[in-house]
Amino acid sequence: MKNGSRPAVAVEGLTKRFGPLEVLKGITLEAHDGEVLAILGSSGSGKSTLLRCINMLEVPDGGTVAIAGEPILLKEKRGGGREPADGAQLDRLRQKLGMVFQSFNLWSHLTVLENVTEAPVHVQKRPKAEATEEALVLLDKVGLSDKRNHYPSQISGGQAQRAAIARALAMRPQLMLFDEPTSSLDPELVGDVLRVIRTLAEEGRTMMLVTHEMAFAREVASRVIFLHQGRVEEEGPPAQVFGAPKSERCRQFISSQLRS
Amino acid sequence: MDLDFLWTTFVRLIGGVPLTLQLAFSSIVLGLALAVLLAVMMRSWFTPLAWAADGFVFVFRGTPLLVQVFLIYYGLGQFRPVLDDMGIWWFFRSPYYCALLALTLNTAAYGAEIVRGGLQSVPHGQIEAARAFGMSGFTLYRRIVAPIALRQALPAYGNEIILMIKATSLCSTITLMEVTGLAHRIISETFRSFEVFFVAGAIYLAINFAMSRLIGLAEARIAPDLDQASRPAEVH
Ligand SMILES: Nc1ncnc2c1ncn2[C@@H]1O[C@H](COP(=O)(O)OP(=O)(O)O)[C@@H](O)[C@H]1O
Ligand SMILES: [Mg+2]
């Protein structure tokens, strides 16, 4: 059941358009247990849309997404497009996906600790005491024990993103999805967040990580995917993608990123 | 200064406070329920519902509360036979119910706008985060959308509560003996309008001062991070 037979996520033939704009043009990829997939690509290449299609925050027009072997059921919508066919199934599968957003999206009416226990208690129906105990361990892990009773408006961006990571981990997800987790942070706050993500990688967690931190991607990723104009332009182990890319566009992108 | 007269006036006017508070709080509670319904209608994908809610708000915000009170109490009296037939004349013959109805509809119209603004202010990203963790439907509303909207709307809604307490004084025009109604009666007996209205005003001020403190406490409790230095809602 481990590697091979049932990938944590399997995406096949994914297409997505926004009006006339075709953002994803048939993406196929898999992430197996324990893999860290880094997703690179210039701005507007469809990286966020890809992650958002995996948990159906955007519903793809074509193709399938399967979480731990179970395809997310979609149906045709009247007047074009598709929509989730089974809300309960989607809610259940989404619990296996820990999403970390570029803009944190912590719930502003809850303290850091409450943010972490909210979904375990009110979605997964776990006992509050147990969820709190686990949340405190997670907050300690991301270095936020002393901020547990602060509200999101009272902490820095770097702290907020680490809280958001703890919130996602509290779901005990099979797959973590990171959408440029450090892109809206001041440079001096990036390091703390990357350190947490590196720890997760070392623990063998399955992750998909959209990032512009090239050095970091090279270091933690087990596989790198380069998206260009809605397609997988290059895919391979970091040494190959960074060291000897087959695609000219990928080579240009990487050298431009390393220069800046 | 005739302190004795002020004191006896005060004691008599206090007798009207229960009615004033009853009118205010009944209409605020009923009006809030209606306001939530209207705000949901405004956001409905079924446009006739949205139009109906918009029309309601347009009418009740655009006309004076006093005219609404008169229209319901005096105006509908013209249709007594019809209302009798419908078996609801007992309601419209009562100045208390008519006043309560006018106050409720009026505050519902303002409240609907406040609730709608609160719902609109909920950041989309926070709703997406909840969805991404498998939260949906009523739980999403109860746990995320409603509390965030409430935080946003509470200061404006606090103002509306204060306005409603003051608006109850209009009910004196259809014979209700709340604080202002009693003041009129005392003046007709004593002709000392300055002292009587002065005391009446002081009573409203005291009620609203206490109310704005309560609202401030509620704000501090619901949104402890939005520190406004425990700023109480302003009294207009
Ligand atoms: N909800 C949306 N509506 C319309 N266009 C969108 C929407 N989301 C993304 N796009 C467009 O799709 C393209 C890809 O966006 P995105 O996936 O966010 O790219 P990336 O994350 O790689 O920068 C961009 O041109 C963007 O403007
Ligand atoms: Mg993006």
Image: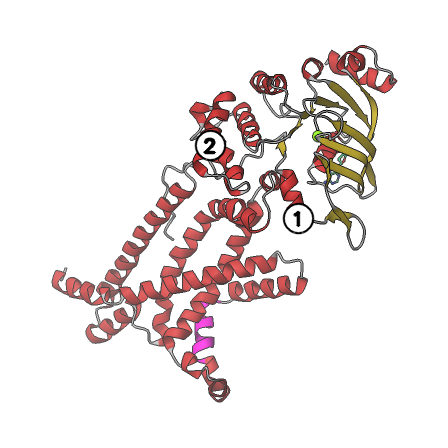
Residue B133, quarter of the rendered image: top right
Asked whether B69 falls inside the magenta stretch, the response is yes
**Is A214 above or below relative to B179?**
above
- Distance, label 2 to label 1, CA atoms, is 28 Å
Q: Quadrant of the C terminus of chain A?
A: top right
Q: Nearer the viewer, residue B62 or A154?
A: A154
Q: Is residue A145 left or right of residue B53?
A: left
Asked whether B30 falls inside the magenta stretch, the response is no
Q: How many marks?
A: 2
**Is B156 above or below relative to A8?**
below
Q: Is residue A123 left or right of residue B191?
A: right
Q: Residue at x 38, y 47 (%)?
A: B233
Q: How many residues crowd around disc 1 within 10 Å: few (fewer than 14), some, or many (20 or more)?
A: some
Q: How many residues crowd around disc 2 within 10 Å: few (fewer than 14), some, or many (20 or more)?
A: many
Look at the numbered disc 1 and give the secondary structure of its residue.
helix
Chain for numbered disc 2: A
Residue B7, quarter of the rendered image: bottom left
Label 2: which residue?
A113
Please tell me which of labels 2 and 1 falls first in the chain.
Answer: 1
Indicate the position of residue A132 as horizontal and vertical percent values.
45, 33
Indicate the position of residue B49 as horizontal and vertical percent values.
63, 64
Residue extent of the magenta highlight: B64-74
Q: Which mark is residue A87?
A: 1
Which marked residue is nearer to the observer: mark 2 or mark 1? Answer: 1
Q: Contact (CB < 8 A) between labels 2 and 1?
A: no
Q: Quadrant of the N terminus of chain A?
A: top right
Q: Give the amino acid at mark 1.
A: Gly
Name the main secondary structure of what is drawn in magenta: helix
